[in-house]
């Protein structure tokens, strides 16, 4: 039996226990007893805590680090305080004693191979043995209290993003993140608000088959692109705190790299929609050309057959491409619904 199946069954059992509690309390309220004979019956159960205690051992909390000496100890202690025992620090060869501090906090430490976040993710997936892995930045910006929100959806999605509160992000990064997320949603047909978030949950076996080739801060986009193409992606809201230490993100350079990667990944994982979408742009010059031809004919009595033919040809091609884009999106949505139903029935 798969882990999602056990999670589903456990939740159903706990739901029944909760129902029994309610009925028992109702019976007691209908038949009051004297203070001397009324028995003490308190069957209240915190279902979230029960499920959490069972499944916290099924997830490894991975903290990728590079020169996070100021924050790493606090991050580790906060994760431990939430009851997560499987903690892995993947260090990118820090020069500020980040690795020493992490090891001194009693967690497992490995050094990444490869460059950038993609190298850290690959190293982590090779090193964990739990069914799920949750990544969170080591700069103190994410609150481990929110981890449960992501775990609560692991039975339906292989990839859950922790979407940050946009008001907590500085205006420049907020604008860039919004632009990138909107573009991603358009290119992959999956609505997300924070595709660049540094907190996300992955199903280990699924993520191990993903390709990770993009450098620097593009790893999250690359993972999300592959999950979105399989209808395995969703998001939940999480809090966001000020960073501890100096930021490594260059807004202009890394923003351009992420935008470029989004188009490249869309071409790789959703080529029909991209091609047809680009082709549909031919409608714009077609309408401009035909409008000019008609205007010249009405105002000056001049007929431009060559331009009229060109505008008509562009309009036909653009309209066909737009139709293909619509059919492609409709087919993709149908595939996603079928995949969701199959996953749901498999988990039952």
Image: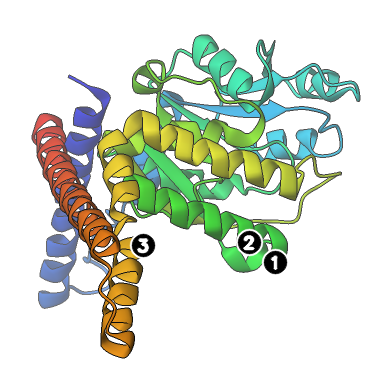
User: Residue beneath label 1, please?
Assistant: 171
Q: CA distance from mark 1 to mark 3?
A: 35 Å
224 displayed left or right of 188: right
127 displayed left or right of 42: right
Label at residue 285? 3
26 displayed left or right of 299: left
Compared with 280, 27 (above or below) is below
Secondary structure at badge 2 equals helix
- Residue at screen point 38% across, 34% down: 267
- Residue contact at pointers 1 and 3, CB within 8 angstroms: no
- Residue at screen point 86% across, 38% down: 70
User: Residue beneath label 2, please?
Assistant: 174
Find residue 167 and report its horizontal and vertical position in percent.
62, 69
Find residue 269 and report its horizontal and vertical position in percent.
34, 31
- Residue contact at pointers 1 and 2, CB within 8 angstroms: yes
Number of other residues with Cα within 10 Å of mark 3, as a class: few under 14, some 14 to 19, many 20 or more: some
- Residue at screen point 38% across, 28% down: 268
Q: Nearer the viewer, residue 229 or 27?
A: 229
Q: How many marks?
A: 3
Q: CA distance from mark 3 to mark 2?
A: 33 Å
Mark 3 or 2, nearer chain start: 2
Q: Quadrant of the C terminus?
A: top left
Secondary structure at badge 3 equals helix
Confirm whether residue 217 shows in the render. Answer: yes
């Amino acid at each position: 039996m798969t882990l999602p199946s056990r999670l589903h069954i456990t939740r159903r059992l706990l739901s029944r226990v909760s129902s029994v509690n309610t009925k028992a309390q109702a019976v007691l309220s209908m038949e009051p007893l004297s203070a001397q004979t009324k028995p003490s019956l308190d069957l209240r159960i915190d279902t979230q805590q029960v499920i959490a205690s069972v499944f916290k051992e099924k997830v490894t909390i991975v903290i990728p680090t590079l020169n996070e000496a100021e924050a790493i100890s606090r991050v580790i202690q906060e994760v431990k305080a939430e009851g997560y025992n499987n903690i892995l620090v993947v260090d990118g060869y820090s020069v500020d004693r980040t690795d020493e501090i992490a090891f001194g906090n009693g967690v497992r430490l490995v050094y990444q191979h490869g460059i950038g976040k993609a190298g850290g993710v690959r190293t982590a997936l090779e090193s964990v043995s739990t069914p799920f892995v949750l990544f969170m930045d080591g700069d103190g910006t994410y609150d481990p209290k929110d981890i449960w929100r992501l775990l609560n959806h692991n039975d339906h999605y292989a990839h859950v993003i922790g979407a940050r509160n946009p008001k907590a992000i500085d205006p420049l990064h907020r604008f860039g993140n919004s632009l990138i997320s909107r573009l991603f949603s358009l290119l992959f047909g999956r609505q997300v608000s924070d595709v660049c978030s540094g907190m996300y949950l992955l199903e280990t076996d699924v993520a191990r088959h993903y390709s990770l080739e993009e450098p620097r801060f593009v790893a999250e986009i690359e993972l999300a692109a592959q999950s979105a193409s399989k209808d395995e992606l969703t998001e939940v809201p999480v809090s966001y705190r000020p960073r501890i230490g100096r930021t490594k993100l260059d807004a202009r350079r890394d923003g351009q790299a992420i935008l470029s990667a989004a188009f490249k990944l869309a071409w790789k994982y959703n080529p029909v929609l991209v091609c047809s979408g680009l082709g549909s742009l031919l409608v714009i010059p077609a309408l401009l050309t035909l409008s000019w031809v008609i205007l010249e004919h009405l105002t000056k009595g001049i007929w431009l057959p060559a331009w009229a033919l060109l505008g008509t040809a562009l309009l036909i091609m653009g309209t066909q491409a737009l139709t293909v884009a619509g059919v492609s999106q409709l087919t993709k949505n149908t595939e996603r619904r079928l995949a969701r139903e199959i996953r749901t029935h498999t988990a039952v």
